[in-house]
Amino acid sequence: MTSRNRSRRSVLAVPGSSRKMIDKAKGLPADEIFLDLEDAVAPLAKQAARESIGDALAEDGWGKQVKVVRVNDWTTEWTYADVVEVVGRAGAHLDAILLPKVPDASHVQALDLLLTQVEKANGLEVGKIGIEPQIENAIGLTNIDAIATASPRVEALVFGPADFMASLNMRTLVVGEQPDGYDRGDAYHHILMTILMAARAHGVQAIDGPYLQIRDVEAFTRSAARTAALGFDGKWVLHPTQIEAANEVFSPRQSDYDRAELILDAYAFHTSAAGGGRGAVMLGDEMIDEASRKMALVISAKGRAAGM
Ligand code: GLV
Ligand code: MG
Protein backbone atom coordinates (compact mmCIF):
# COMPACT_ATOMS: atom_id res chain seq x y z
CA MET A 1 0.00 0.00 0.00
CA THR A 2 1.33 3.48 -0.77
CA SER A 3 1.23 6.18 1.88
CA ARG A 4 -0.88 8.46 -0.37
CA ASN A 5 -3.99 8.34 1.80
CA ARG A 6 -2.44 7.91 5.22
CA SER A 7 -2.91 10.54 7.89
CA ARG A 8 -0.28 13.32 7.97
CA ARG A 9 -1.65 15.61 10.69
CA SER A 10 1.74 15.95 12.39
CA VAL A 11 4.93 15.68 10.33
CA LEU A 12 7.96 15.47 12.61
CA ALA A 13 11.29 16.81 11.29
CA VAL A 14 14.31 14.88 12.59
CA PRO A 15 17.94 15.66 11.68
CA GLY A 16 19.36 12.63 9.90
CA SER A 17 22.74 13.25 11.50
CA SER A 18 21.48 12.56 15.03
CA ARG A 19 21.07 8.86 15.72
CA LYS A 20 19.87 9.75 19.21
CA MET A 21 17.04 11.92 17.86
CA ILE A 22 16.07 9.31 15.26
CA ASP A 23 15.83 6.63 17.94
CA LYS A 24 13.72 8.91 20.12
CA ALA A 25 11.42 9.78 17.19
CA LYS A 26 10.58 6.11 16.56
CA GLY A 27 8.26 5.99 19.55
CA LEU A 28 6.60 9.39 19.13
CA PRO A 29 2.94 9.68 18.05
CA ALA A 30 3.58 11.80 14.93
CA ASP A 31 1.65 10.66 11.84
CA GLU A 32 4.73 11.16 9.67
CA ILE A 33 8.41 11.29 10.52
CA PHE A 34 10.87 12.70 8.04
CA LEU A 35 14.56 12.14 8.48
CA ASP A 36 16.43 15.11 7.07
CA LEU A 37 19.49 15.04 4.84
CA GLU A 38 19.02 18.65 3.71
CA ASP A 39 19.26 21.83 5.76
CA ALA A 40 19.55 20.17 9.17
CA VAL A 41 22.71 18.29 8.12
CA ALA A 42 26.10 19.94 7.47
CA PRO A 43 27.79 19.09 4.14
CA LEU A 44 30.55 17.04 5.75
CA ALA A 45 28.03 15.04 7.78
CA LYS A 46 25.82 14.01 4.83
CA GLN A 47 27.41 10.63 4.04
CA ALA A 48 27.36 9.50 7.66
CA ALA A 49 23.74 10.67 7.91
CA ARG A 50 22.72 8.64 4.83
CA GLU A 51 24.18 5.51 6.40
CA SER A 52 22.67 6.17 9.77
CA ILE A 53 19.21 6.88 8.28
CA GLY A 54 19.38 3.69 6.19
CA ASP A 55 20.34 1.58 9.20
CA ALA A 56 17.74 3.19 11.47
CA LEU A 57 14.88 2.72 8.97
CA ALA A 58 15.71 -0.96 8.52
CA GLU A 59 15.65 -1.61 12.28
CA ASP A 60 12.62 -2.62 14.37
CA GLY A 61 10.88 -0.38 16.83
CA TRP A 62 9.00 1.99 14.54
CA GLY A 63 5.34 2.73 15.09
CA LYS A 64 2.90 3.11 12.22
CA GLN A 65 4.21 6.52 11.16
CA VAL A 66 4.60 7.39 7.48
CA LYS A 67 8.40 7.18 7.06
CA VAL A 68 10.00 9.77 4.81
CA VAL A 69 13.51 11.02 4.04
CA ARG A 70 14.22 14.56 2.85
CA VAL A 71 17.00 14.49 0.27
CA ASN A 72 18.95 17.50 -0.97
CA ASP A 73 17.60 19.44 -3.93
CA TRP A 74 18.72 18.81 -7.50
CA THR A 75 20.92 21.94 -7.71
CA THR A 76 23.37 20.37 -5.22
CA GLU A 77 25.81 17.53 -5.85
CA TRP A 78 24.12 15.28 -3.25
CA THR A 79 20.66 14.24 -4.47
CA TYR A 80 21.52 11.11 -6.46
CA ALA A 81 23.72 9.70 -3.71
CA ASP A 82 21.06 10.47 -1.07
CA VAL A 83 18.52 8.40 -3.03
CA VAL A 84 20.84 5.54 -4.05
CA GLU A 85 22.24 5.17 -0.54
CA VAL A 86 19.00 5.45 1.48
CA VAL A 87 16.72 3.46 -0.85
CA GLY A 88 19.49 0.88 -1.34
CA ARG A 89 19.81 0.37 2.41
CA ALA A 90 16.18 0.66 3.47
CA GLY A 91 13.87 1.12 0.47
CA ALA A 92 11.44 -1.53 1.70
CA HIS A 93 10.88 0.50 4.89
CA LEU A 94 10.58 3.90 3.25
CA ASP A 95 7.21 5.40 2.27
CA ALA A 96 8.24 8.57 0.45
CA ILE A 97 10.98 11.03 -0.42
CA LEU A 98 10.54 14.70 0.47
CA LEU A 99 12.09 16.75 -2.35
CA PRO A 100 12.94 20.34 -1.38
CA LYS A 101 13.06 23.55 -3.44
CA VAL A 102 11.16 22.15 -6.43
CA PRO A 103 11.02 24.87 -9.12
CA ASP A 104 9.18 22.90 -11.83
CA ALA A 105 7.99 19.47 -12.94
CA SER A 106 11.42 18.39 -14.22
CA HIS A 107 12.77 18.01 -10.67
CA VAL A 108 9.95 15.64 -9.75
CA GLN A 109 10.32 13.71 -13.01
CA ALA A 110 14.07 13.32 -12.44
CA LEU A 111 13.43 11.87 -8.98
CA ASP A 112 10.72 9.58 -10.35
CA LEU A 113 13.13 8.16 -12.96
CA LEU A 114 15.93 7.69 -10.47
CA LEU A 115 13.60 6.03 -7.95
CA THR A 116 12.34 3.62 -10.60
CA GLN A 117 15.88 2.56 -11.40
CA VAL A 118 16.95 2.22 -7.78
CA GLU A 119 13.77 0.29 -6.93
CA LYS A 120 14.45 -2.14 -9.81
CA ALA A 121 18.11 -2.55 -8.90
CA ASN A 122 17.12 -3.44 -5.34
CA GLY A 123 14.25 -5.79 -6.16
CA LEU A 124 11.62 -3.39 -4.79
CA GLU A 125 8.12 -2.87 -6.11
CA VAL A 126 8.36 -0.12 -8.73
CA GLY A 127 6.34 2.97 -7.83
CA LYS A 128 5.85 2.19 -4.17
CA ILE A 129 7.98 5.07 -2.88
CA GLY A 130 6.07 8.33 -3.05
CA ILE A 131 7.27 11.90 -3.58
CA GLU A 132 6.40 14.97 -1.51
CA PRO A 133 7.50 18.09 -3.45
CA GLN A 134 8.29 21.08 -1.24
CA ILE A 135 7.09 24.42 -2.58
CA GLU A 136 9.69 26.89 -1.33
CA ASN A 137 10.00 29.71 -3.84
CA ALA A 138 8.06 31.91 -6.24
CA ILE A 139 8.89 29.83 -9.30
CA GLY A 140 7.68 26.62 -7.62
CA LEU A 141 4.37 28.26 -6.76
CA THR A 142 4.02 29.50 -10.33
CA ASN A 143 4.47 25.94 -11.64
CA ILE A 144 2.48 24.20 -8.95
CA ASP A 145 -0.06 22.40 -11.18
CA ALA A 146 2.70 20.89 -13.32
CA ILE A 147 4.59 19.88 -10.17
CA ALA A 148 1.53 18.21 -8.62
CA THR A 149 0.91 16.17 -11.79
CA ALA A 150 4.56 15.48 -12.72
CA SER A 151 4.45 11.89 -11.44
CA PRO A 152 1.89 9.44 -10.06
CA ARG A 153 4.24 9.17 -7.08
CA VAL A 154 3.28 12.65 -5.80
CA GLU A 155 1.40 12.22 -2.51
CA ALA A 156 1.53 15.65 -0.90
CA LEU A 157 2.49 19.26 -1.60
CA VAL A 158 4.46 20.75 1.28
CA PHE A 159 4.85 24.46 2.05
CA GLY A 160 8.41 25.56 2.99
CA PRO A 161 7.81 28.94 4.62
CA ALA A 162 11.39 29.78 5.65
CA ASP A 163 12.88 29.37 2.18
CA PHE A 164 9.76 30.87 0.62
CA MET A 165 9.96 34.06 2.67
CA ALA A 166 13.65 34.37 1.78
CA SER A 167 12.86 33.89 -1.92
CA LEU A 168 10.29 36.70 -1.77
CA ASN A 169 12.60 39.09 0.14
CA MET A 170 9.85 39.21 2.75
CA ARG A 171 10.93 41.31 5.72
CA THR A 172 10.53 38.76 8.47
CA LEU A 173 12.73 36.47 10.49
CA VAL A 174 9.99 34.74 12.47
CA VAL A 175 8.73 31.79 10.45
CA GLY A 176 5.00 31.33 10.81
CA GLU A 177 4.27 34.86 12.04
CA GLN A 178 3.16 37.89 10.03
CA PRO A 179 5.92 40.20 8.76
CA ASP A 180 6.38 43.31 10.88
CA GLY A 181 4.53 46.29 9.45
CA TYR A 182 1.96 44.22 7.53
CA ASP A 183 -1.52 44.77 8.90
CA ARG A 184 -3.75 43.75 6.00
CA GLY A 185 -4.58 40.20 7.06
CA ASP A 186 -2.58 37.05 6.48
CA ALA A 187 0.53 37.65 4.35
CA TYR A 188 0.67 33.91 3.53
CA HIS A 189 -2.93 33.51 2.43
CA HIS A 190 -2.33 33.55 -1.32
CA ILE A 191 0.53 31.05 -1.09
CA LEU A 192 -1.37 28.69 1.20
CA MET A 193 -4.54 28.83 -0.90
CA THR A 194 -2.61 28.21 -4.13
CA ILE A 195 -0.96 25.13 -2.62
CA LEU A 196 -4.30 23.91 -1.25
CA MET A 197 -6.10 24.46 -4.56
CA ALA A 198 -3.46 22.51 -6.49
CA ALA A 199 -3.53 19.71 -3.92
CA ARG A 200 -7.30 19.39 -4.11
CA ALA A 201 -7.41 19.78 -7.89
CA HIS A 202 -4.98 16.89 -8.29
CA GLY A 203 -6.00 14.66 -5.39
CA VAL A 204 -2.92 14.94 -3.16
CA GLN A 205 -2.45 16.11 0.42
CA ALA A 206 -1.56 19.68 1.46
CA ILE A 207 0.93 20.08 4.31
CA ASP A 208 1.83 23.31 6.09
CA GLY A 209 5.47 23.94 7.07
CA PRO A 210 7.16 24.57 10.40
CA TYR A 211 6.58 27.08 13.19
CA LEU A 212 10.01 27.84 14.55
CA GLN A 213 9.26 29.22 18.04
CA ILE A 214 9.16 25.73 19.47
CA ARG A 215 8.61 26.72 23.11
CA ASP A 216 5.41 28.62 22.36
CA VAL A 217 2.89 25.81 21.89
CA GLU A 218 -0.03 28.21 22.09
CA ALA A 219 1.28 30.24 19.16
CA PHE A 220 1.99 27.02 17.25
CA THR A 221 -1.58 25.88 17.85
CA ARG A 222 -2.93 29.22 16.64
CA SER A 223 -0.84 29.02 13.48
CA ALA A 224 -1.84 25.37 12.86
CA ALA A 225 -5.53 26.15 13.44
CA ARG A 226 -5.45 28.72 10.63
CA THR A 227 -4.29 26.24 7.98
CA ALA A 228 -6.45 23.44 9.41
CA ALA A 229 -9.48 25.72 9.01
CA LEU A 230 -8.60 26.29 5.35
CA GLY A 231 -8.51 22.53 4.75
CA PHE A 232 -4.83 21.59 5.02
CA ASP A 233 -4.16 17.99 6.07
CA GLY A 234 -1.31 18.62 8.50
CA LYS A 235 1.71 20.63 9.56
CA TRP A 236 5.36 20.10 10.32
CA VAL A 237 6.33 19.79 13.94
CA LEU A 238 9.85 20.40 15.21
CA HIS A 239 9.48 19.27 18.79
CA PRO A 240 7.54 16.52 20.59
CA THR A 241 5.42 19.16 22.39
CA GLN A 242 3.95 20.27 19.04
CA ILE A 243 2.84 16.74 18.01
CA GLU A 244 -0.22 16.45 20.20
CA ALA A 245 -1.35 19.97 19.31
CA ALA A 246 -1.08 19.21 15.58
CA ASN A 247 -2.88 15.87 15.90
CA GLU A 248 -5.71 17.58 17.70
CA VAL A 249 -5.96 20.64 15.47
CA PHE A 250 -5.95 18.63 12.23
CA SER A 251 -8.55 16.11 13.45
CA PRO A 252 -12.19 17.13 13.16
CA ARG A 253 -13.85 18.19 16.40
CA GLN A 254 -15.86 15.29 17.87
CA SER A 255 -19.10 17.28 17.53
CA ASP A 256 -18.37 17.97 13.83
CA TYR A 257 -17.50 14.32 13.23
CA ASP A 258 -20.72 13.14 14.93
CA ARG A 259 -22.77 15.63 12.94
CA ALA A 260 -21.11 14.56 9.68
CA GLU A 261 -21.94 10.90 10.38
CA LEU A 262 -25.52 11.89 11.16
CA ILE A 263 -25.82 13.80 7.87
CA LEU A 264 -24.42 10.83 5.93
CA ASP A 265 -26.81 8.40 7.64
CA ALA A 266 -29.83 10.66 7.16
CA TYR A 267 -29.02 11.33 3.54
CA ALA A 268 -28.44 7.63 2.78
CA PHE A 269 -31.74 6.75 4.48
CA HIS A 270 -33.73 9.34 2.53
CA THR A 271 -32.01 8.41 -0.71
CA SER A 272 -32.85 4.73 -0.40
CA ALA A 273 -36.40 5.51 0.75
CA ALA A 274 -36.79 7.61 -2.41
CA GLY A 275 -35.66 4.70 -4.56
CA GLY A 276 -32.16 6.07 -5.17
CA GLY A 277 -33.21 9.58 -6.16
CA ARG A 278 -31.39 12.45 -4.49
CA GLY A 279 -32.58 15.89 -3.57
CA ALA A 280 -32.87 18.15 -0.55
CA VAL A 281 -34.08 16.50 2.66
CA MET A 282 -34.64 17.78 6.19
CA LEU A 283 -32.41 16.85 9.11
CA GLY A 284 -33.98 18.44 12.17
CA ASP A 285 -34.26 22.13 11.24
CA GLU A 286 -31.56 21.99 8.59
CA MET A 287 -32.04 21.36 4.91
CA ILE A 288 -29.33 19.08 3.55
CA ASP A 289 -28.57 18.14 -0.02
CA GLU A 290 -25.88 16.55 -2.16
CA ALA A 291 -23.39 19.33 -1.35
CA SER A 292 -24.00 18.81 2.39
CA ARG A 293 -23.24 15.13 1.86
CA LYS A 294 -19.92 15.97 0.19
CA MET A 295 -18.93 18.31 3.02
CA ALA A 296 -19.88 15.66 5.55
CA LEU A 297 -17.82 13.07 3.66
CA VAL A 298 -14.69 15.25 4.02
CA ILE A 299 -15.09 15.54 7.81
CA SER A 300 -16.01 11.88 8.15
CA ALA A 301 -13.00 10.71 6.10
CA LYS A 302 -10.62 12.91 8.13
CA GLY A 303 -12.12 11.61 11.37
CA ARG A 304 -11.84 7.98 10.32
CA ALA A 305 -8.23 8.46 9.18
CA ALA A 306 -7.56 9.94 12.63
CA GLY A 307 -9.10 6.84 14.27
CA MET A 308 -12.36 8.47 15.51
C1 GLV B 1 11.35 24.35 5.28
O1 GLV B 1 12.08 23.66 4.63
C2 GLV B 1 11.26 25.77 5.09
O2 GLV B 1 12.03 26.30 4.29
O3 GLV B 1 10.42 26.39 5.76
MG1 MG C 1 13.34 24.84 3.27
Image (cartoon, rainbow, N blue to C red):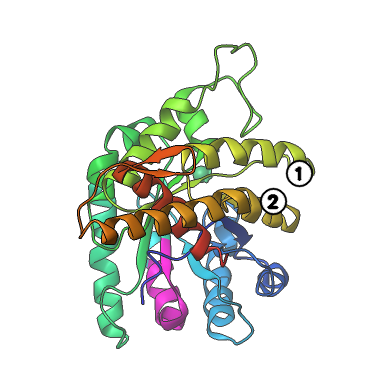
x and y, in percent, of residue 53 in the image: 55, 73
Q: Nearer the viewer, residue 48 or 29?
A: 29
Amino acid type at image mark 2: Ala
x and y, in percent, of residue 288 in the image: 38, 42
> What residue sits right under mark 1 in the picture?
217
Q: Residue at x 22, y 44 (%)?
A: 146
Picture quadrant of residue 65: bottom right
- Relative to 215, is 56 above or below? below
Q: Nearer the viewer, residue 90 or 279?
A: 279
Give the class, few, some or many, for how many residues have Cα within 10 Å of label 2's Cα (few <14, many ≥20). Answer: many
Q: Callout 2: helix, strand or loop?
A: helix
Dot 2 or dot 1, earlier in sequence: 1
Q: Are discs 2 and 1 less than 8 Å apart at CB?
A: yes
Q: Residue at x 47, y 27 (%)?
A: 189
Q: Could you tell whether 168 is left or right of 215 in the image? A: left
Q: Nearer the viewer, residue 141 or 242?
A: 242
